[in-house]
Amino acid sequence: MELLEKVLLDNVKKEYQESLTLLKSIPGIGNKTALMLLVFQRFQRAKELCSYAGLTPIIRQRETSVKGRPRISKMGNPKLRNLLFMCSFNACKYNQACKALYDRIVAKGKSKKLALIAVCNKLLKQAFLIVKNGIPFNREYKSTLA
């Protein structure tokens, strides 16, 4: 690693130490992903962040006769999307909310890859809300918007 890159990385870690600590408290998110997720400081909503990562679904449909399979847009940051996909494997093991989502989607008969993409979306939304609110990850938290 170059000296300039190392200095920049140290400055980023000093500047955003609290955010990095909050992000690493989420089961399934490591150092590299936490550093990549610091970009969301400029977003107002979690949907915007999901769109930036290229994880939003796109439905291809021509009028009423031809209906294509839904896919992810892939118009966003491919490195962030790749890191999140790798994190989703660990999240399915150690993050209870992500595991429940994965099991529910696979039980419906959907593909495992689609379930992992949904887990990526869940991880992004968890990370966004945890850092925006400044509260560390809580395993027992239940949303009141059920």
Image (tube, rainbow, N blue to C red):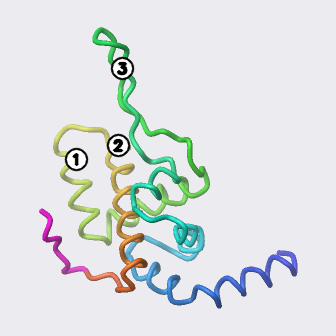
Pointers 2 and 1 in contact (C-beta within 8 Å)? yes
Q: CA distance from mark 3 to mark 1?
A: 23 Å
**In this rendering, is residue 74 above or below 132?**
above
- Name the quarter where the N terminus is drawn: bottom right
Could you say where residue 101 lies in the image, as x and y percent from the top left? 23, 56
Q: Residue at x 72, y 80 (%)?
A: 9
Q: Which secondary structure, mark 2?
A: helix
Please give the residue where the numbered disc 3 appears in the rendered image.
61
Could you say where residue 105 lies in the image, as x and y percent from the top left? 22, 47
Please give the residue where the numbered disc 1 appears in the rendered image.
105
Q: Earlier in the sequence, mark 2 or mark 1?
A: 1
Q: Which residues are magenta?
A: 139-146
Pointers 2 and 3 in contact (C-beta within 8 Å)? no
Please give the residue where the numbered disc 2 appears in the rendered image.
114
Q: Quadrant of residue 91?
A: bottom left
The amino acid sitting under disc 1 is: Ile
Instruction: Count all numbered tags in the image, as a single digit.
Output: 3
Q: Nearer the viewer, residue 112 or 118?
A: 118
Q: Residue at x 24, y 79 (%)?
A: 139
Q: Which secondary structure, mark 1?
A: helix
Mark 2 Cα shell of 10 Å, populated few (<14), some (14-19), many (≥20): some
Q: Is residue 114 left or right of residue 32?
A: left
Q: Residue at x 23, y 45 (%)?
A: 106
